[in-house]
Each structure stands twice: as structure tokens, then as C-alpha cells.
């Protein structure tokens, strides 16, 4: 035994380590192939049963030599590495809202209004099962009529946050006054400015100031009668105060179409192209408010994504027929699978 022998063994260890890593890479290449075939055959990608079988076979074979807990831990890492890209596509393992909105295209879904604790828990759980990570829901509703339901306010926002946390989701919700910025700031992961407040310059400044410290994302919706330039300038009230994380949301504009079209607004889809040319801010599309009818929502969302939209926001309700607001334009969560499949096949 001499130092040369130790060095020889160490070289062998180094080469085994390299082999292990090369095997990791090879394994991932093969799982990627399986995922692409499954995609083509419209089969579900994630197969929990198969993972259980892989683990139990290896434990049967090796647990007399290697501690089964250790086998489990190693396999968890290997399986995670193999499905890394798939998980990222589904946003599952991302714990930061900024990272999440940097993956294109991202989906925001949830009801128009938070109606009750049960309602928001149910929809959040269904959306989580589909891999949706950003939950929308209005607690303060700027309704056209003062006689319409105005939202569950603070209580609704608490239900929303709670439902999101239970389901590994982030919250986007509309704020309508500065009191919410002071008292309820932490309940929103993205602050929404509604189309009706796009012109409220005093409020925009307050939001810009409040979010300049942590650069919390702010989503601003285009007013139905704002020009693109007015829309951009409204966003700049916030970016100018030091928060660059502003998302522009197109949601339909009012044109002469509304004289006899059944669409609630005219979907301003091509504005995605123009905005992409003139700003680096993220641009997303809301087909629910733009079309006003659930049957047009998915095709319009797909069109928006194909035009380069960074994401889409869709009103989703477990039983749209009983929704307190905007039921007609709300889709059921299962309808989202059409959109998710489309994205998985094409992006
Ligand atoms: C909403 O998204 O909750 C909403 C009220 O839409 P808009 O501000 O576009 O009317
Ligand atoms: Mn709505």
C-alpha cells in the first residue's frame, strides 16, 4: 500500500462520479423522449404509479445493501432531475412570483368574485390539480351599478389568500383604494388595477410608491376607451416611481361593434403585436372580459398566445351558472385542459 495506490483509487472514484452524472443525463434524454411521445398520444405526462413501481423494484433489489431511506432520497433527486423541464413548464416548483411570470406563456385563472370560503377553496383546489399557479379573484369589485354585489372585501381577500396558500398558488387581486395598499398589501402577490381605474392617476401614483420598495408586480388593465398610448402612459406612472414589474393586460375595447355584436367588448388582440414593438413590459390578454362569452374564451386565449402574449387571464368558476358575477363568460376548470394541452404541445 502506498500513496500511488490511493491516487489510483481516487482516479477510479472520479471516473465513477463522472459515469453517474453521464447516466443522469442519458436518463433525462430518454424521459424527455417518453414525454414527447406521450404528448403526441395525448397521454398524461405525470405517472405517479410508475414512480412508485420504480422505487419499490430498486428497494427490493438493493435494500439489503443500501438503506431504503437513502434509496428513496436518491431516487427522488433522480426523478426530479429527469422531469425538471416538464415541471418547469407546469410551473410547479417555482416559489417566486417574478420567476413565474417570466415563464411564457403563464396562466392566471379564478373566479370573477370571491363569493365564499367554500367557493374559492373548491376552485383553487381544482386549478392546482391542473398546475395553475396564479389564482385570481375579486374581493373589491368596482361594479357599474352601486346596487350590484360589491365583493366580500377584506374577508374575501383573506379567503382568497388562504385558498391560494393551501394550494401552492399566488394571488392576484384588484385593489381599488389606498386603504387596501396600507392594510392588505401582503394579501396580494400581484396587485391588479382594474380597467375602470386605469385613469385614476392619483391611485396609480400611490401604487407606484407603495410597490417601489419590493417591486411587487402590478397588473394594469386597459380601459375600454383608452388608446394604446394612454395605456402605456398609465403604466409609466408606476414604472417611473421605481417598480419595473408592470404587466399590461388587454381586455377588450368598446367600438361600434358593440352596437350589434354579442361580444361584450372588441377583443384588441392585434394590440399585442403593437405593444410588443413599443414596450418591454409584459403583455397579457383577458379573453373573458373581452368576449363576454365562455364559448369564445379558449380560442381567443390561444390566439393571444400565438400573437406573442406573455400570458392569459381567464375567469374560471366551478359552476358558472350560479356565479354571482360574470358567470356567462366564466369557463369551468376542466375546460382549461384544452388550453394547457395546446401550450404543452406548442410552447
Ligand atoms: C376583473 O378582471 O376582475 C375586472 C373587473 O375586469 P376589468 O377591470 O377589465 O373590467
Ligand atoms: Mn369579471
Image (cartoon, grey):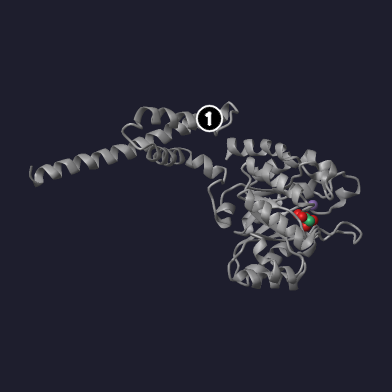
Q: Is residue 210 left or right of residue 330?
A: left
| Quadrant that contains the C terminus | top right
Residue 123 on image: x %, y %: 72, 45
Q: State the count of labels.
A: 1
Q: Is residue 135 something one can see in this rendering?
A: yes
Please state the horizontal and vertical placement of residue 300, each as a whole percent of the image.
73, 42
Q: From where the camera sits, is residue 222 visible?
A: no
- Where is ligand 1, by quadrant? bottom right
Above or below, 60 against 282 in this view is: above
Q: Position of residue 337 (x, y in %)?
A: 67, 36
User: Which residue lies under the disc numbered 1?
Assistant: 49
Whether label 1 lies within 8 Å of ligand 1 gets the answer no
* Residue at left offset 38%, top offset 34%: 26
Say which quadrant the N terminus sits in.
Answer: top left
Q: Residue, x 14% and y 45% (percent of image)?
A: 7
**Point 62% across, 59% down: residue:** 281
Q: Residue furthest top?
A: 41
Is 207 above or below relative to 98?
below
Q: Residues within 10 Å of mark 1 (few under 14, many from 20)?
A: few
Query: Which secondary structure lies at badge 1?
Result: helix
Residue at x-position 67% and y-position 61%: 187
Give the quadrant of residue 346: top right
Q: Is residue 179 left or right of residue 308?
A: right
Residue that sits furthest to the front in the current view: 64
> Which residue occupies the foreground of this view, 53 or 289?
53
* Residue 89 coordinates in the image, percent (x, y): 55, 43
Of residues 250 and 159, which is closer to you in this image?
A: 159
Amino acid at each position: 500500500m502506498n500513496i500511488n495506490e490511493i491516487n489510483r483509487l481516487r482516479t477510479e472514484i472520479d471516473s465513477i462520479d463522472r459515469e453517474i452524472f453521464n447516466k443522469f443525463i442519458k436518463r433525462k434524454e430518454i424521459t424527455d423522449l417518453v414525454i414527447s411521445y406521450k404528448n403526441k398520444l395525448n397521454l398524461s405526462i405525470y405517472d405517479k404509479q410508475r414512480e412508485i413501481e420504480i422505487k419499490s423494484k430498486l428497494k427490493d433489489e438493493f435494500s439489503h445493501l443500501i438503506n431504503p431511506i437513502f434509496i428513496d432520497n436518491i431516487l427522488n433527486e433522480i426523478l426530479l432531475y429527469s422531469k425538471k423541464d416538464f415541471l418547469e413548464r407546469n410551473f410547479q416548483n417555482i416559489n417566486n412570483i417574478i420567476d413565474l411570470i417570466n415563464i411564457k406563456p403563464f396562466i392566471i385563472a379564478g373566479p370573477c368574485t370571491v363569493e365564499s370560503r367554500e367557493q374559492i377553496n373548491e376552485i383553487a383546489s381544482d386549478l392546482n390539480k391542473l398546475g395553475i399557479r396564479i389564482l385570481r379573484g375579486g374581493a373589491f369589485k368596482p361594479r357599474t351599478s352601486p346596487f350590484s354585489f360589491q365583493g366580500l372585501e377584506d374577508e374575501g381577500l383573506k379567503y382568497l389568500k388562504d385558498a391560494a396558500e393551501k394550494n401552492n398558488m399566488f394571488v392576484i387581486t384588484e385593489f381599488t383604494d389606498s386603504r387596501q395598499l396600507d392594510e392588505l398589501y401582503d394579501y396580494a402577490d400581484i396587485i391588479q388595477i382594474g380597467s375602470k381605474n386605469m385613469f385614476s392617476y392619483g391611485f396609480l401614483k400611490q401604487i407606484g410608491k407603495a410597490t417601489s420598495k419590493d417591486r411587487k408586480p402590478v397588473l394594469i388593465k386597459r380601459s375600454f376607451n383608452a388608446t394604446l398610448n394612454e395605456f402605456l402612459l398609465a403604466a409609466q406612472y408606476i414604472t417611473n416611481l421605481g417598480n419595473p414589474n408592470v404587466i399590461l393586460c388587454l381586455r377588450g375595447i368598446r367600438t361600434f361593434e358593440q352596437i350589434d355584436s354579442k361580444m361584450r367588448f372588441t377583443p384588441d388582440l392585434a394590440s399585442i403585436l403593437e405593444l410588443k414593438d413599443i414596450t418591454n413590459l409584459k403583455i397579457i390578454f383577458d379573453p373573458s372580459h373581452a368576449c363576454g362569452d365562455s364559448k369564445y374564451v379558449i380560442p381567443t386565449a390561444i390566439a393571444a398566445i400565438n400573437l406573442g402574449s406573455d400570458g392569459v387571464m381567464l375567469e374560471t368558476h366551478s359552476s358558472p351558472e350560479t356565479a354571482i358575477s360574470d358567470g356567462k363568460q366564466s369557463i369551468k376548470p376542466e375546460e382549461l385542459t384544452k388550453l394547457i394541452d395546446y401550450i404543452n404541445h406548442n410552447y
